[in-house]
Image (tube, rainbow, N blue to C red):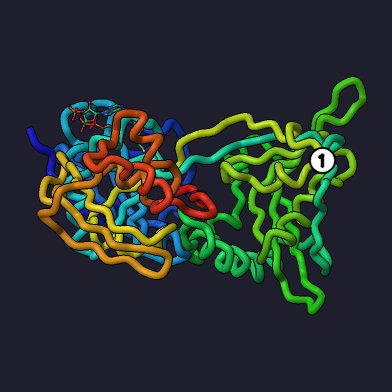
């Protein structure tokens, strides 16, 4: 039995939103539907129907993704993937994935990205684990900075309106330097600013801070939440970072200091942070920044292998022939000659003998430099018909900084 797929209409948007609720486990009110409407690209939705009933859903955002070399690539951000519990394991997800990747290819996007509810789902569709993120906590009375910020200027506590006049531009400049980061459209900020109580994870509403340079130009932004707790009369209050971006590392360090120097605060917590959080190396006692979680974050699928590979820059100048397997989209499989370096890259199909062989998902994992070829080789995922090619690929695909997915979607 097949279930027809098509994009939804504007009138069907509440029905689609309703279809998400049981699979993702939430109940919502009318406001959520309107927020959802603001950010949904209707022509990129996909629903599977059993007669009138919507039994499968998917969608995509049209993103700009930063790739190594600080270049921007159009990428599809796959989202709202669900199949009704009454129709699971009948191939609906597979049919939506097929149709969606065809659509991505037709639009000329070379890459699809997503975040996964379960890490076991998307490898079979050619998505590789491309970035991880960490969560940590830091007790403020142990958080002396051995390398304090050298930024000059000043901090201002502001209201949400003032924050939104300047904060988004700070993010927009910074995300262009972070492989794995995506742009945030105005609708994203519009929804974010509403700070709906049920999205706060039991914490307070946000506080907002801007950093200004000596000329009064905003060059840093911080949003955080606070929870109130005490034990034996002692503060257990926690500040949780929501957004923290600066024009440079020194401004970001000034924002960290602002949080860590707060009175009546026991600790600062952060989630979805880069795995190489520089703050650790500023601390006099780096062990005090306690990592509480490291999880897979961005999953990346190469849709047009040559288009994507030639769109980034590489850590060293080299030529590698990669033989790619792609059971889900067999026409993508084949041998690719990648000739690249720090200043540019070219990619063509070739008949030459391969230096490396791997699944398209593993090439997706390597793409942003979030994992080494050596790790994938040692995991039995990459072969090297040319001895030494894995080591060459380590240096070639490396990214500095490592990828960080700044924006959940
Ligand atoms: C995950 C979900 C979309 C799967 O939909 P589905 O229609 O049952 O999937 P399909 O029947 O098309 O399965 C396709 C393949 O994926 C596998 N698969 C599906 N869900 C899986 C899961 N959660 N974990 C591991 N494998 C899974 C199937 O076994 C099948 O494997 P095969 O091709 O080797 O036979 C559905 O279970 C769901 O909505 N879950 C709750 C919401 C959710 O997690 N959505 C994903 C958000 S990122």
Tag 1 secondary structure: loop
Query: Camera-side residue: 350 or 261?
Result: 350
Farthest residue to the bottom: give it. Answer: 215
- What residue do we see at 45% from left, 51% from top? 398
Counting every numbered tag in the picture gives 1
Q: Quadrant of the N terminus?
A: top left
Give the left or right position of residue 288, taking residue 180 as reference. right
Crowd band around label 1 with a 10 angstrom C-alpha radius: few (<14), some (14–19), many (20+): some
Which quadrant of the render holds ligand 1? top left
Q: Would residue 82 be seen by someone viewing this image from the given angle?
A: yes
Give the left or right position of residue 18, taking residue 83 as reference. right
Q: Is residue 201 above or below residue 45?
A: above
Query: Camera-side residue: 122 or 390?
Result: 390
- What residue do we see at 22% from left, 52% from top? 321
Q: Is residue 370 above or below residue 74?
A: above
Mark 1, residue position: 284
- What residue do we see at 49% from left, 62% from top? 184
Farthest residue to the left: give it. Answer: 1
Query: Camera-side residue: 334 or 132?
Result: 334
């Amino acid at each position: 039995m097949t279930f027809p797929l098509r994009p939804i209409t504007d009138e069907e948007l509440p029905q689609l939103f309703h279809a998400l609720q049981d699979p993702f486990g939430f109940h919502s009110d009318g406001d959520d539907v309107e927020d959802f409407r603001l950010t949904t690209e209707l022509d990129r939705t996909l629903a599977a129907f059993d007669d009138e009933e919507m039994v499968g859903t998917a969608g995509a955002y049209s993103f700009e993704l930063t790739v190594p070399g600080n270049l921007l690539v159009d990428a599809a951000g796959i989202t709202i993937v669900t199949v009704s519990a009454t129709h699971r394991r009948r191939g609906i997800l597979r049919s939506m994935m097929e149709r969606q990747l065809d659509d991505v290819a037709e639009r000329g996007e070379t890459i699809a990205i997503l975040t996964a509810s379960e890490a076991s789902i998307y490898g079979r569709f050619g998505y590789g684990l491309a970035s991880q993120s960490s969560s940590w906590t830091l007790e403020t009375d142990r958080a002396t900075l051995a390398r304090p910020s050298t930024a000059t200027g000043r901090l201002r506590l502001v209201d949400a309106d003032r924050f939104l006049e300047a904060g988004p531009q700070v993010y927009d400049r910074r995300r262009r330097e972070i492989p794995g980061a995506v742009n945030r459209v105005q609708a994203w900020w519009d929804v974010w600013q509403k700070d709906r109580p049920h999205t706060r994870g039991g914490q307070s509403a946000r506080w907002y801070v801007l950093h200004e340079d000596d000329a009064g130009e905003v060059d840093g932004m911080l949003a955080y939440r606070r929870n109130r707790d005490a034990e034996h009369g002692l503060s257990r209050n926690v500040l949780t970072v929501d957004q923290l971006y600066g024009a440079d590392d020194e401004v970001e360090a000034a924002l960290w200091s602002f949080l860590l120097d707060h009175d009546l605060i026991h600790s600062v917590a952060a989630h979805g942070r880069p795995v190489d959080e520089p703050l650790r190396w500023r601390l006099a006692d780096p062990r005090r920044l306690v990592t509480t979680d490291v999880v897979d974050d961005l999953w990346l699928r190469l849709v047009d292998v040559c288009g994507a590979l030639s769109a980034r820059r590489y850590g060293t100048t080299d030529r590698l022939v990669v033989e790619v397997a792609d059971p889900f989209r067999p026409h993508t499989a084949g041998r690719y000659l990648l000739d690249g370096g720090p200043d540019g890259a070219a990619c063509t199909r070739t008949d030459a003998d391969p230096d490396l062989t791997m699944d398209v998902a593993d090439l997706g994992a390597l793409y942003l430099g979030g994992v080494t070829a050596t790790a994938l080789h040692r995991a039995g995922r990459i072969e090297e018909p040319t001895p030494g090619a894995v080591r060459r690929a380590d240096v070639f695909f490396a990214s500095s900084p490592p990828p960080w997915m700044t924006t959940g979607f």
